[in-house]
Structure formats: structure tokens, C-alpha cells
Image (spheres, rainbow, N blue to C red):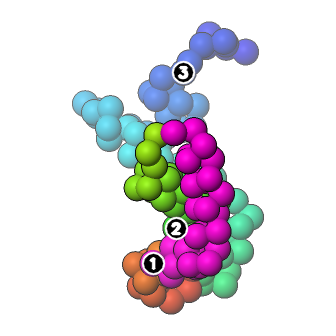
Amino acid sequence: QGPNKGKSKGLVELSKEFCVQLPSKVKLNEIREILSKHRAFQNITKLEMLAIKYHIKIIYCPKCHRELNGIEGLWCNQKAFVRSRTDQSFEKMIKLIADSRTHFVERQIALKLFRRFQLKHILKVKHMLIF
């Protein structure tokens, strides 16, 4: 419906639609700031509502974080292990890949990576969830 059907609406059009009064000679970044506070742009997930209810801070971490994701820690450790010991022959690399898995488990590297993250980040905040 309307003249903007199938088109991207400008911020001024959105502000009119939401009945937001804009000051005269307003700049684009000011319009963004004003509209960002409008209820239509205040999306909150159920998880975030639950965290607010129980006074818990949620910190979203990168999905491929080697200190938090065990498989990423394994890949990172395997690459470093193989690179430091290889002679560039295929047979040696295959053997090193197998050895790197054993090395990862025996030295408890996943636990060390998580503890490193914990020391850097978690101990600074009392209540938080990491996702």
C-alpha cells in the first residue's frame, strides 16, 4: 500500500509513519538516533527479558571463538602443532595430525583455553551468561 510499496522507505518517511516529530534542519545521524529509541526498533528476545528479570548480563561472543568453542580450539592447536613439526611430506603430516589430537587431549588444552578466557573476561563480571 502507499507510494512506497516495494521500495525502501527513507528515515523521514518512517518518522512520519511512526508520528515522530523531527526538529527542523535535523541531520541524518540525529534522525537515526531519534528513531533508534522508538518502540518499533526496541526488539528484545525472551532470553534477554529473562536476563533482565534475574539481573543477569548476557554477553554474546563470536561463534568461532577458539577459547570458548572446543572444536575451534582443537583446529587452532592442530594447525600450530603440525606447522611446528612438519617436514612437508604427506606421510609426516598425516602422522602429525593424529599426534596433535592426542596432544590436545593429554595436555587438556580445551580446559586451558577456557580458563584463559575465564581469567580475561568472566572474573570481571559477577553475573553473566555467555552465548
Q: Which residue is mark 2?
A: 67
**Amino acid type for the residue under numbered disc 2:** Glu
Element assignment for label 2 = loop
**Amino acid type for the residue under numbered disc 3:** Lys
Q: Earlier in the sequence, mark 2 or mark 1?
A: 2
Judging depth in this view, the residue of 32 and 76 nearest the camera is: 76
Q: Which residue is mark 3?
A: 9
Q: Residue at x 63, y 47 (%)?
A: 94
Judging depth in this view, the residue of 98 and 27 nearest the camera is: 98
Between the C-alphas of marks 2 and 1, the distance is 7 Å
Number of residue marks:
3
Q: Is residue 117 left or right of residue 108?
A: left
Q: Which residues, given as a range, are shown in magenta?
A: 89-116
Q: Is residue 89 left or right of residue 46?
A: left
Q: Nearer the viewer, mark 1 or mark 3?
A: 1
Q: Quadrant of residue 129?
A: bottom right
Quick one: which residue is furthest to the left in this view?
Answer: 25
**Does residue 58 appear in the picture of this structure?**
no
Element assignment for label 3 = loop
Judging depth in this view, the residue of 71 and 48 nearest the camera is: 71
Q: Quadrant of residue 101?
A: bottom right
Between the C-alphas of marks 1 and 3, the distance is 47 Å
Quadrant showing the N terminus: top right
Q: Quadrant of residue 84?
A: bottom left
Q: Earlier in the sequence, mark 1 or mark 3?
A: 3
**Does residue 12 appear in the picture of this structure?**
yes
Which SS does the magenta portion mostly show? helix
Q: Which residue is mark 1?
A: 116
